[in-house]
Each structure stands twice: as C-alpha cells, then as structure tokens.
Image (spheres, grey):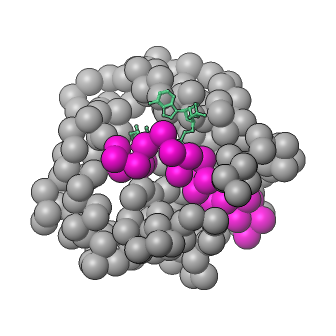
C-alpha cells in the first residue's frame, strides 16, 4: 500500500527493521495493561511483525485487518501504531485501535495518525462506521477517543478477557459523515 502521510508522520506497513523500535513499547507492561497483548520479548515482536505482514492491507472481507506503524518523518523511527479490522462487510463497519510509545505521548501523535487513518479508511474501503472498544479503566484512551470526536455509545459488562480478567468495555463510534466534523487537527496549529 501507499503510505499515508501527515505533517510529522508516515503511516506504513511494519518491517523487521522496525523490531527494535517496536520492542521499546511492546515490552512495556504499562503500555499493554489495557490491551490484550502480553508484554513482549524480542522474539515475540519478530513473530507479530511476521503476522502483520500477512495482511493484504485491505478491508474488503470480514476479518481483514491491517497494522500501520507511525514513522517519524525526521528519522523513520516508529513511535506508535494503528490497527484496523473489518467487523462486518455488509454493515461496512470496522474496528480501530491505537498505541503510542510512552516517550512520545501527549504530543498529538495519536491524534494526527488516527485522524489521517480514519479519513483514508472511510474513503478507501467505503466504510460507514468505525468503532473502538476501550477498557473502562483506560481513561486516557477514552479521553483520547472523545478528543478525536468519537462518541461513547455503550458500556459492555465483562465483554473482554484481558490478562486473566473479565473487563468492562466502552464502545466508541464515529460515522462516515461525522469524520469531516472531527475537531480541528492539532497539527494544523503547529505551524
Ligand atoms: C491512548 C494513547 C494512544 C494516547 O496517545 P497520545 O499520543 O498520548 O495522544 P495525543 O497526544 O494525540 O492526545 C490527544 C488527546 O488524548 C487525550 N489524552 C491522551 N493521553 C492522555 C493522558 N495521559 N491523560 C489524559 N488525557 C490524555 C487528551 O485529550 C489529549 O489531548 P490534549 O493533550 O490536548 O489534552 C496512549 O496513551 C497509549 O498508547 N496508551 C497505551 C496503549 C493503549 O491503551 N491503547 C488504547 C487501547 S484501547
């Protein structure tokens, strides 16, 4: 696929050269606390990159998924990633997720990447609705979804098992027609 470009980032498929960058945050127990991954070793990261690379980078058929790294334009370092998967082709609904390397947190990178990804994905795959499932304890991520312009639509009780525990989750959503109304992109204000 063609990378997605933003003012500071290039969103692109991940490769084995990115493993050291990914390991910095995939191995951090705080980063993965509310996402269904273990804290990963080097070998685990190599394995997930192999799995990411099996993607067709397309959301056409139910179950299709993709992962894009956020590489800094300045030096190509990967400082986060987005994932998307098609939940229903008949309902044109996909799921989105986000992770920022903590050293690069609170600098607007997740917002910059996710807004660009959503704009691209709605158009490219003719999506109607994108949802995010967020552990109710993950208040930073919920605040992030709200800042992005997503709407909290539901609370699901003990819906996801994460690290041996049943967790309540919030469902956040955005519709295609709402993407243009998303808040002014923070990076527009950086100039
Ligand atoms: C959630 C997460 C992706 C946010 O990434 P980020 O790059 O720091 O986010 P941004 O800098 O783009 O922040 C955008 C907005 O999100 C909210 N936000 C992000 N981090 C926050 C924090 N630590 N505390 C409160 N609000 C936060 C704020 O509203 C922020 O806007 P503001 O800085 O103008 O107040 C990041 O904290 C993360 O990777 N968490 C661990 C992984 C995870 O749980 N992923 C989500 C699974 S559902």
Q: Is residue 29 above or below residue 111?
A: above
Q: Is residue 9 above or below residue 144?
A: below
Q: Residue at x 39, y 31 (%)?
A: 160
Residue 175 sits in which quadrant?
top right
Q: Position of residue 38 (x, y in %)?
A: 21, 44
Across and down, in percent, residue 159 comes to 43, 26
Is residue 42 visible to the viewer in this orientation of the structure?
yes
Q: Residue at x 28, y 79 (%)?
A: 17
Magenta region: which residues? 99-124
Corner quadrant of residue 7: bottom right
Q: Quadrant of the N terminus?
A: bottom right
x 32%, y 23%: residue: 166
- Magenta residues: mostly which secondary structure? helix
**Residue nearest the observer in this picture, 149 or 62:** 149
Residue 11 position, x and y percent, is 53, 68
Q: Is residue 123 left or right of residue 28?
A: right
Quarter of the rendering occupied by the C terminus: bottom right
Residue 169 visible from this viewpoint: no
Residue 149 lies, with reference to residue 48, above or below; the image says: above
């Amino acid at each position: 696929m063609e990378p997605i470009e933003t003012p500071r980032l290039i969103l692109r498929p991940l490769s084995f050269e990115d493993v050291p960058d990914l390991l910095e945050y995939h191995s951090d127990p705080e980063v993965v606390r509310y996402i269904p991954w273990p804290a990963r070793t080097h070998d685990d990261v190599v394995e997930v990159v192999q799995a990411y690379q099996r993607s067709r980078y397309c959301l056409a058929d139910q179950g299709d998924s993709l992962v894009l790294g956020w590489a800094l334009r300045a030096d190509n370092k990967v400082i986060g990633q987005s994932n998307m998967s098609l939940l229903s082709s008949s309902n044109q609904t996909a799921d989105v997720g986000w992770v920022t390397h903590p050293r690069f947190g609170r600098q607007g990178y997740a917002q910059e990447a996710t807004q660009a990804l959503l704009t691209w994905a709605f158009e490219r795959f003719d999506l109607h609705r994108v949802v995010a499932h967020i552990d109710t304890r993950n208040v930073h991520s919920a605040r992030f979804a709200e800042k992005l312009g997503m709407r909290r639509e539901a609370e699901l009780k003990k819906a996801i098992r994460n690290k041996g525990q049943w967790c309540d989750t919030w469902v956040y959503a955005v519709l295609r027609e709402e993407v243009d109304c998303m808040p002014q992109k923070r990076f527009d204000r950086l100039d």
